[in-house]
Amino acid sequence: MSTTVSRRQRLHELLLALISRADELPLLDADRPDLDAGPAPGLWLDRNRRTLSHYQALVRTAVTLDALLDAEDNPRDFTAG
């Protein structure tokens, strides 16, 4: 298995592990609000933005954990000289 495929698989597994630990995962609200309803479109957009940010945080956490695991597997000598 190539390094890229193996890393992608590890990222996938890390992300699934993070998702499984979440109490509740919000889903994007697909129902478009009535644009003439006043503040509802703004609330809808803000709720979906927060949901997307939540998932982006999960992905960033998985990538960070993957990088830490990679650093443990391949330590580099950063000493001067």
Image (cartoon, grey):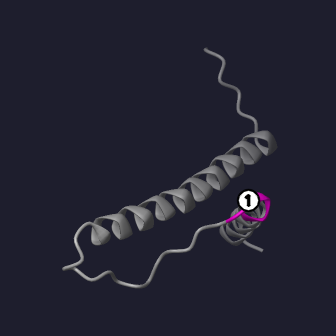
Lateral position of residue 67 relative to residue 46, left or right: right
Q: Is residue 34 above or below residue 60?
A: below
Q: Nearer the viewer, residue 67 or 22?
A: 22
The foreground one among 79 and 24 is 24
Q: From the viewer's perspective, is 62 left or right of 69?
A: left
Give percent across and percent down for residue 14.
Answer: 75, 60
Q: Label 1: state its secondary structure.
A: loop
In the depicted structure, whether residue 4 falls above or below residue 36: above
Q: Which residues are magenta?
A: 18-24
Is 51 a magenta residue? no
| Res. 72 image quadrant | top right
**Residue found at the far front of this picture:** 37
Q: Residues within 10 Å of mark 1 (few under 14, many from 20)?
A: few
Q: Residue at x 72, y 41 (%)?
A: 71
Judged from this view, the residue extending furthest toward the left is 36
Q: Residue at x 61, y 15 (%)?
A: 80
Label 1 sits on residue: 22
The percent position of residue 38, horizontal first and vertical second, equals 22, 70
Quadrant (top left/top right/bottom left/bottom right) for the N terminus: bottom right
Determine the image quadrant of residue 74: top right
Question: Which amino acid is tagged 1?
Answer: Ala
* Quadrant into which the C terminus falls: top right
Q: Is residue 68 above or below residue 34?
A: above
Give the residue drawn at x 34%, y 83%. 32
Q: Position of residue 41 (x, y in %)?
A: 29, 72
Q: Residue at x 75, y 36 (%)?
A: 75
* 23 magenta-colored: yes
* Quadrant in the picture for residue 4: bottom right
Give the answer, above or below, for where 61 lies relative to 12: above
Left or right of 78 in this view: 74: right
Residue found at the far top of this picture: 81
Q: Name the spot of residue 54 as percent of width and height, x first.
A: 54, 57
